[in-house]
Image (cartoon, rainbow, N blue to C red):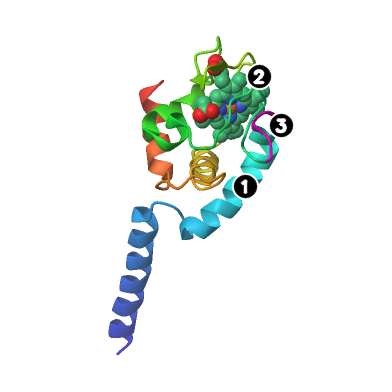
Amino acid sequence: MKKVMLAILVLVIASAFVSQQTKPQPGGLKAAMTRGKTVYETVCLACHQVDGLGVQNMNPPLAKTKWVLGDKKALIKIVLKGLQGGEIEIDGDKFHNPMPPQESTLSDQEIADVLTYIRNSFGNKASLVAVGEVKAMRAKLK
Ligand code: HEC
């Protein structure tokens, strides 16, 4: 009997571990949104603003842009490495502030959370960003 209990216990722990590993975000979308909001308010809000609409000629909006809603790899790269030189153009507007790189200030989890947050805020609706996707991009850019 003891052996059976032990076997069940091992199975339960193992399956919990496996589901944790394969889930795109710990705690699902809701938890990721809460964590991502905190990162956004601490790091991004000063430039991109509380409504995600940015500041004309300085910082671009994050609402329904092709970078926020498009290819996740390109989006992750923007946050890791930053941008400057007015590479972004939205409705004829260019932005003259630099976007600071976050590779040494934010963890993979924090970047996954903040990108999940901006992809599902300001009228946006797009898939979650998983920590593994950020990890892979960070390794590739080394
Ligand atoms: C110091 C101001 C500043 C901060 C802080 C900042 N950004 Fe930016 N961001 C910019 C500017 C300026 C650009 C455009 C740069 C260019 O065109 O060269 C940009 C571009 C972007 C873009 C691509 C263009 C778009 O609007 O879709 C995304 C996505 C983005 N930032 C997300 C973030 C996120 C997420 C954070 C927080 C982790 C953040 N930014 C923090 C200023 C900032």
Q: Is mark 2 within 8 Å of ligand 1?
A: yes
Secondary structure found at label 2:
loop
Q: Which residue is mark 3?
A: 46
The image's mark for residue 129 is none
Q: Which residues are magenta?
A: 46-50
Q: Is mark 3 within 8 Å of ligand 1?
A: yes
Q: Nearer the viewer, mark 2 or mark 1?
A: 2
Residue 9 location (% of width, % of height):
36, 76
Q: Which residue is mark 2?
A: 58
Amino acid identity at mark 3: Ala
The quarter of the picture where residue 74 lies is top left
42 left or right, relative to 62: right
Q: What distance separates the C-alpha of mark 2 from that of mark 1?
A: 22 Å
Secondary structure found at label 1:
helix
Amino acid identity at mark 2: Met
Disc 3 crowd, CA 10 A, few/some/many (<14, 14-19, 20+): few
Residue 47 lies in the magenta-colored region: yes
Chief secondary structure of the magenta portion: helix
Residue 142 location (% of width, % of height):
41, 20
Residue 41 location (% of width, % of height):
68, 41
Quadrant of picture, ligand 1: top right
Disc 2 crowd, CA 10 A, few/some/many (<14, 14-19, 20+): some
Disc 1 crowd, CA 10 A, few/some/many (<14, 14-19, 20+): many
Residue 65 location (% of width, % of height):
48, 32
The image's mark for residue 37 is 1
Quadrant, the N terminus: bottom left
Residue 7 lies in the magenta-colored region: no
The earlier-in-sequence mark between 2 and 1 is 1
Q: Nearer the viewer, mark 2 or mark 3?
A: 2
